[in-house]
Amino acid sequence: MNRLRTVILLGALTGLLMLIGGYFGGRQGVVIAFVIAVVMNFGTYWFSDKVVLAMYRGREVSEAQAPELFGIVKSLALRAGLPMPRVYIIPGETPNAFATGRDYDHAVVAVTEGLLRILNREELEGVLGHELTHVKNRDILIGSIAATIGGAVVMLANMAQWAAIFGFGRSDDDEQGGGMLGLLAMAILAPIAAMIIQMAISRSREYLADDGGASVSGKPYALASALEKLSYAAKVKPMQANPSTAHMFIVNPLTGRSLANLFSTHPPIEKRIERLRAMRPA
């Protein structure tokens, strides 16, 4: 169901792009905005691992440096049918984890020092299974596609906004266009709609990663327990995270910040835990 929902949401995002592009600039406007968005997001996708790891001061560890962590990742990757990803540790007490990398051969799994301190082995297996599922499902690619289309929508909306301000849009008596007010309304509402759809796609991928994490580790209860611990810790001591990377983490690092919660990239943690506890252990 969540896979179907992702397809539908990506279709809705594409439809929104076509709508605002056709409204403002016709087919040419859509093409121009889409090409610019592709160029802007290509670098982010291609170098996402380097950028994010540098942002959080991650350090790569070998099997000799972190034998238990490395061993768990190696075992789960084998079970999931994936090449061994690189393993990183992020400094910081707030427990969290994320996966990045443009494809299977460039995948990275990163965990914070705090996560290694508070989770037992079974809970750690559940979390790492979740992150490896993101890799297997190519969620970095899907997120990049959504960001590209969303970026094109925002770009067209900005163009429409400036056109409305300087009077370059359709006249008020234009039956098809709706005039300046319609143009301005489109410029304001389209980016909000694009953001909401992108957030919904992210939430759907999190549910799929929970399912995969429970399946790969064979311990849905342990993953539920880990999410409970991580959620509590995020409320007590929110991570100093960049909002643009919040969707990557297994638990929203911005929990507790009211403005961030208005457009959450993650499903309600209580619902995720409830779903996992309803599963049968493998």
Image (cartoon, grey):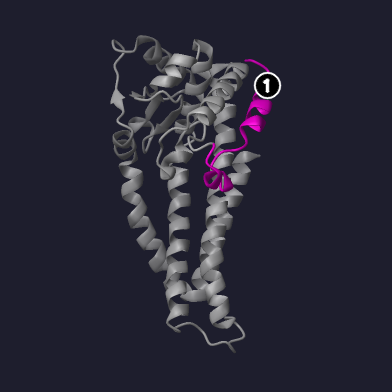
Q: Position of residue 71 (x, y in %)?
A: 39, 12
Using residue 88 as the reference point, say whether residue 201 is left or right of it.
right
Task: Say if the magenta span includes residue 276.
Answer: yes
Q: Quadrant of residue 204?
A: top right
Query: Where is 200 relative to 171, above or below?
Result: above
Tell which of 226 and 37 is nearer to you.
Answer: 226
Residue in the image at 46% along x and 73% along y: 161
Single out the residue that lies furthest toward the right.
278
Query: Where is 13 relative to 265, above or below?
Result: below
Q: Position of residue 265 (x, y in %)?
A: 53, 42
Report the quarter where the N terminus lies: top right
Residue in the image at 36% along x and 35% along y: 101
Which residue is disc 1 drawn over? 277
Task: Say if the magenta span includes residue 243.
Answer: no
Q: How many marks?
A: 1
Single out the residue that lies furthest toward the bottom.
173
Q: Position of residue 263 (x, y in %)?
A: 56, 48
Residue interval drawn in magenta = 256-282
Using residue 89 as the reference point, say whether residue 20 is left or right of it.
right
What kind of residue is marked 1? Arg
Residue in the image at 45% along x and 20% along y: 115
Q: Secondary structure at mark 1?
A: helix
Tell which of 65 and 11 is nearer to you.
Answer: 65
